[in-house]
Amino acid sequence: MQRRSLRIEETLVKAFIYFSVICVVFALFNILWHILSHGVGLITWEFISSYPRDMGRAGGILPSIVGTACLVALAVAVAAPIGILTATYLAEYAGKSGVMRAVRFSIDTLAGVPSIVFGLFGFAFLVIFCGFRWSILSGGLTLAFMILPVIVRTSEEAIKSVPYEYRECSLALGATKWQTVARVVLPAAAPGIVTGIILGIGRSVGETAAIMLTAGSSLGLPTSIMDPVRSLSLHLYILVSEGVSFEMGYATASVLIILIFCVNLITNLLVRYMITKRMGAGAH
Amino acid sequence: MRRRIEWLIEKSLLLSAIVGTLIVMLIAVFTFLEGFPFLAKYGITSFITGKVWDPAYGEFGILSMIIGTFYVTIGALIIGVPIAVACAIFLAEMAPQPLARLFRPIIELLAGIPTVVYGFFGLIVIVGFIKSHFDVPGFSILAASIMLAIMILPTVINISEDAIRAVPKQYKEGSLALGATHWQTIRYVILPGARSGLISAIFLGMGRAIGETMAVIMVAGNTALIPTSMLDPVRTLTINIALEMGYAYGDHSSSLFATGIVLFVLIICLNALVTRLKRRVTE
């Protein structure tokens, strides 16, 4: 009797687990299918290479593509060096000191702060206090703060997973700690670090709330770092929320999804490369 | 000479590590600087417990948005967490290698889709669905909760899976050796063993749901009233800032920064809880 109720319970649980997995798969494919089936057909060379006309009802998204590229490039240029150095410090130098705990807590907090609060901060600090106005500079720096935790965490993992023997060999050859870190550990961790940077790129491409309050929403092509821009994701939001054009919305959303798809693909390939390389090293 | 260079390098690394801490402090300082004078003037209690939000008439009560955020977040957790934990069990305990290898990129992609794209999808598909089935406008707590439930899935799945995998193999082997079935082992040994990890997964998912802006803004309806049913429109704290920051000035603008303070404090508390849980696991 008891065994029978147990069997029923097991069957039910298993059914729920499979149901959940199917739900997740269905959710993703439903979203992708819905957006891409409406949008991909509208992506033409003209759409990608021309200016929007009539507030975005017609024409293309060239300024938004350029704007997104500028924002992302600036964010990565600022966040990557700081992030990698922070990760190096945490993984190689910090030990278990109070400083490390404070840094780690800050990084975790930074990862959890809602993007709209980043936006508020960027607005108060960069746009007003520093006088950068709504510009690529303000938006890019705000994004840099946002993606810093992603880069730090991924790089730290990568640095920590470099086999300990590498360091011992280098130190035994008479290299100093920094020489070891810079010439042995970091190169070995490079694919993992690059993965972190790419994840950061993915995150900044999709970000909207923080950009909305810091980068402006100009439809023109930027000529300097102090010009306002409208990123792709913000363009999509404005198109849809103000009911400008759902068609253009689908097309823009498809461009975004294709971008993210590429980012994920590259990340996966890098991770796979890293694993095979590590396994190859282990075999020798 | 060499030692001095090493010393210099270590200190400059420390310096860049401190940048993160500096940014957190700057965020705190600047949101508080902008928001706190307003809070002092208007009164924290009347700000948090005020039911009316009408900046044009000097009414700044965010109770309806706190309640809205609460409902939407709880809704997302109720829908999302069981599914996410089930997926984590699937990945860690049941899935054969090839199936797991297929499933993982799906979760990554789900994590990568920009929040506006989710919002756009929700606006058309989820809101449309609710509209056609319940005879209401469709912009509602329910729509926002479903949207957020999908969005927190990757976070909760990944952290729960790690937690489940971190349970020592011997526990599982012991339980199976005593004659327990696989499900009994999962339920009485593995899940309790992974408990603090699972709880931090839920907290982190909660943080994500509380902080989400662009997806919710497109499906929640955004009226600043206390909702009475799942099908009522709501405004969350994040929506309040995103919606009105564009044209706010004076007290209105400061009140939005004060809303930001409430959010920031909420997230810091959640984070401190997670950190404490993590420490308990490692000790």
Image (cartoon, grey):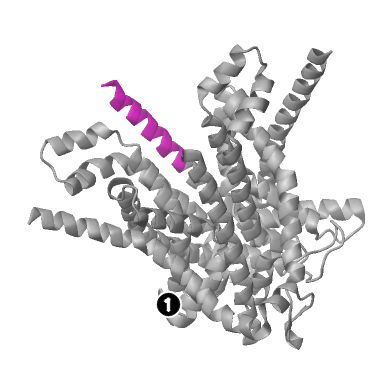
Q: Which secondary structure, mark 1?
A: loop
Q: In the picture, which quadrant includes the C terminus of chain A? A: top left
Three-letter code, disc 1 = Met
x, y percent for residue B249: 62, 85
Q: Quadrant of residue A279?
A: top left
Tell me which secondary structure the magenta stretch mostly adopts.
Answer: helix
The answer to whether residue A33 shows anywhere in this view is yes
Q: Which residues are magenta?
A: A267-284
Say which residue label 1 marks: A226
Lateral position of residue B69 relative to residue A102, left or right? right
Which subunit holds the residue at mark 1?
A
* Vertical side of B77 occupied by A167: above or below: above
Residue A269 falls within the magenta-colored stretch: yes
Lateral position of residue A4 relative to residue A284, left or right? right
x, y percent for residue B120: 69, 57
x, y percent for residue B216: 70, 60
